[in-house]
């Protein structure tokens, strides 16, 4: 068994916390796990990509080779599209339908792709995937910083490797007391968003 998960987002979205929850759960299940992050120039707002590799055999590199990503989690739309070519032929994506304009966009030196173009790229790829409004949901619960936990909850509904209740226990153990209840609520909300997307599919 081998599963490669890539989380693509921007600084401040909590990639590292999300990957640490998943990695701890997988280690508890007895799998071999390697995780690493590649971080762009800006700590907050720059590109952040987390590689998470899990196997029942030894893993020799923490970086996922091109074309070997089984699940691509996009915490931000363009950052997911930047890494889309890394998906395996039968890989799937889980997209947070959220746009974070780059610094160049804010300086009017670049433009963010229109929705129609983004939709066309995803459709043309033929890849299976789900788009959920994780950041919008997170804000309703307590703030956009909960987006990463919403996405983790969503992932547990699309990958049979993850047991939602056990992952939730790991989340509870890693959450500071002051945000634990909100984190657990965000996790459940992520699962509900994907279940709704599945019903509409």
Image (cartoon, rainbow, N blue to C red):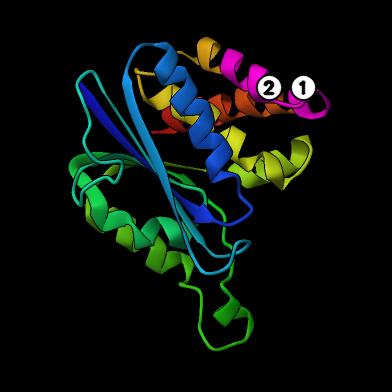
**Residue that mark 2 sits on:** 184
Q: Is residue 199 visible?
A: no
In the image, farthest residue toward the right: 178
Region of the chain picked out in magenta, as a range = 168-180
Question: Percent x, y for residue 88?
Answer: 19, 44
Q: Is residue 161 left or right of residue 91?
A: right
Q: Is residue 170 magenta?
A: yes
Q: Residue at point 39% right, 37% down?
A: 35
Q: Is residue 80 magenta?
A: no
Task: Name the image quarter holding the C terminus.
Answer: top left
Question: Percent x, y for residue 103?
Answer: 59, 77
Task: Name the image quarter holding the N terminus.
Answer: top left
In the image, farthest residue toward the bottom: 109
Q: Is residue 12 above or below residue 159?
A: below
Q: Mark 1 to mark 2: distance in Å?
A: 5 Å
Disc assigned to residue 181: 1
Q: Is residue 37 visible?
A: yes
Q: Is residue 52 left or right of residue 1?
A: right
**198 or 11: nearer the eye?**
11
* Majority secondary structure of magenta residues: helix
Q: Residue at point 48% right, 35% down?
A: 19
Q: Residue at point 44% right, 23% down?
A: 157
Q: Please tell me whether mark 2 sits on a helix, a strand or a loop.
A: helix
- In this rendering, the count of numbered labels is 2
Q: Residue 64 falls in which quadrant of the image?
A: top left
Q: Is residue 75 above or below residue 71?
A: below
User: Do callouts 1 and 2 mark residues in contact (Cβ within 8 Å)?
Assistant: yes
Q: Residue 192 falls in which quadrant of the image?
A: top right
Question: Percent x, y for residue 54?
Answer: 30, 27
């Amino acid at each position: 068994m081998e599963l490669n998960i890539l989380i693509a987002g921007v600084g401040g979205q909590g990639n590292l916390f999300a990957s640490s929850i998943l990695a701890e759960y997988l280690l508890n299940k007895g799998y071999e796990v390697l995780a690493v992050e590649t971080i762009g120039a800006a700590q907050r707002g720059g590109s952040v990509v987390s590689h998470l590799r899990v196997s029942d055999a030894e893993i020799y590199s923490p970086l996922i080779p091109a074309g070997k990503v089984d699940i691509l989690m996009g915490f931000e739309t363009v950052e997911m599209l930047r890494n889309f070519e890394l998906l395996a032929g039968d890989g799937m994506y889980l997209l947070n339908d959220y746009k974070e304009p780059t610094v160049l966009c804010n300086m009017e030196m670049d433009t963010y792709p229109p929705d129609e173009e983004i939709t066309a790229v995803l459709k043309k790829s033929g890849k299976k995937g789900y788009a959920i409004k994780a950041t919008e949901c997170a804000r309703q619960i307590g703030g956009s910083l909960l987006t990463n936990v919403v996405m983790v909850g969503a992932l547990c509904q699309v990958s049979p490797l993850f047991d939602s209740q056990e992952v939730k226990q790991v989340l509870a153990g890693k959450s500071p007391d002051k945000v634990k209840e909100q984190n657990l609520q965000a996790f459940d909300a992520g699962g509900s968003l994907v279940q709704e997307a599945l019903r509409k599919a």
